[in-house]
Image (cartoon, helix red, strand yellow):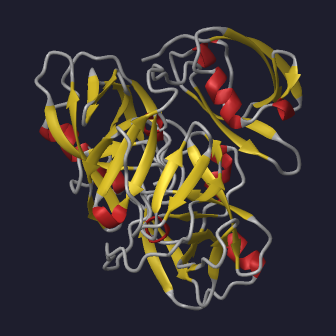
Amino acid sequence: MVRPSAVAALVAVALSLSACDSVGQAYPLNKDVAIPFELANNHIFVKVNVDKSKPLWFVLDTGDKYAIINEQNAKDIGLDLGGGEVEVTGVGNQTSTAYYVKNSSYSIAGLDGFSQPIFLALPLEGVAAHTGHASAGIIGFDFLSKFIVEIDYDNKTLILHDRDQYQYHGNGEILPLTFGHGHPHIAAQITQEGRAPIDATFLLDVGDGGAVTLNSPFVTQEHLMDSSQKTALRTMGYGVGGGFKSPVGRIRQLEIGRFTIPNPVTAYSQATGGAFATNEVQGSIGADILRKFKVILDYAHNRVILEPGAHFADPLEYDMSGLALSANDVPEKTLNVDEVYPDSPASEAEIQGGDVITSIDGRPISQYTLSDVREMFRHETKHDLTFDRGGQTVNVTLKLRRLI
């Protein structure tokens, strides 16, 4: 599932199909292949070509099974969408129409001879808007299962190993995976203040930009909102299936194998439908935690290997502004205020929904990415912001503070 921010899920496609978890045949490699990626808001973007298209950016997402292309990109390329329709659901209760793609495939730059079918086309424009990075599609299980895939967040590189020849000799933690509909599940343990640890099963989701999400049946069953912890209500969905709001707070710790992650930011889903209302798993562990590690995905042997990375000990922070932002590059780059949350620095500075940020600390917004700004807004400091508000220039000082 793809999320644009710590708790804002964008696409978690659930198909009315029998999704097979078989890894199928390996794709043989004579040597390891390194694929560079770009990281935007914790999402991994790799370059692909669809048929004979120019290079396009696709998101790598363990919460996805099939190769999916944005509907508009499919039409621009001229793909055949005449294979029929299917209704898909995402994070909300609504459905969206997707189209089966006929006789088209994608390939990955640097991986000679490899190609896989494009399975579906559906509207994915929100991925680009809420990650601030060009995005034309998603790849997941069907790609990952052909290799041993080493995700090196520190060096922004995917290293592909031959699935049948790979042997691991490191000191990382080797943990078992199970699969449901192509989605990897991992056992972990959460602890809230004043309570005994709770064992749970989580979706291991590199396409989730946040840290921890607890699904609504689990939240209800374990009375996880009964504690006196501080939470803030935030929007969790922007895309397929519609959006909904959820409390966001922290748990005392998350334990994955021998690793303990203290005070992770945690969304307590209250969804009544969609991906975060399922009881197939108790929640998801996202890239805000996974990027602390080098992650080695070995689907053929039902395991994941975690090696602590350079940022393993970094504390997990959350937005301190109270602003929900999106990006737009047409006709020129802008950062737009989609929502201002109450009782936040943004509301106190009288920023309004619909404002457009034109500069930060005297630098034009064209010099920042959405990732840059979101990272800036995770630190207790202050920034001078200039907005365009319906043609008027508005200057404010935003004094950031920890909200959860």
- Quadrant for the C terminus, please: top left
Residue at x 35%, y 67% (from the top left corner): 182
Rendered view: 326 above or below 51: above
Residue 126 left/right relative to 21: right
Residue at x 48%, y 57% (from the top left corner): 149
* Whole-percent x, y for residue 47 in the image: 69, 61
Residue at x 72%, y 54% (from the top left corner): 134
Q: Can residue 390 be seen in this view?
A: no
Residue 378 left/right relative to 162: right
Q: Which of 207 and 121 is in front in this view?
A: 207
Rendered view: 184 above or below 67: above
* Whole-percent x, y for residue 105 in the image: 62, 81
Where residue 278 sits, quadrant-wise, is: bottom left
* Whole-percent x, y for residue 375 in the image: 62, 26
Residue 387 left/right relative to 146: right
Residue at x 56%, y 70% (from the top left corner): 30
Q: Which of 167 and 240 is in front in this view?
A: 167
Exactly how many numbered labels are in the figure?
0
* Whole-percent x, y for residue 353 in the image: 66, 32
Q: Is residue 323 visible?
A: yes
- Quadrant for the N terminus, please: bottom left
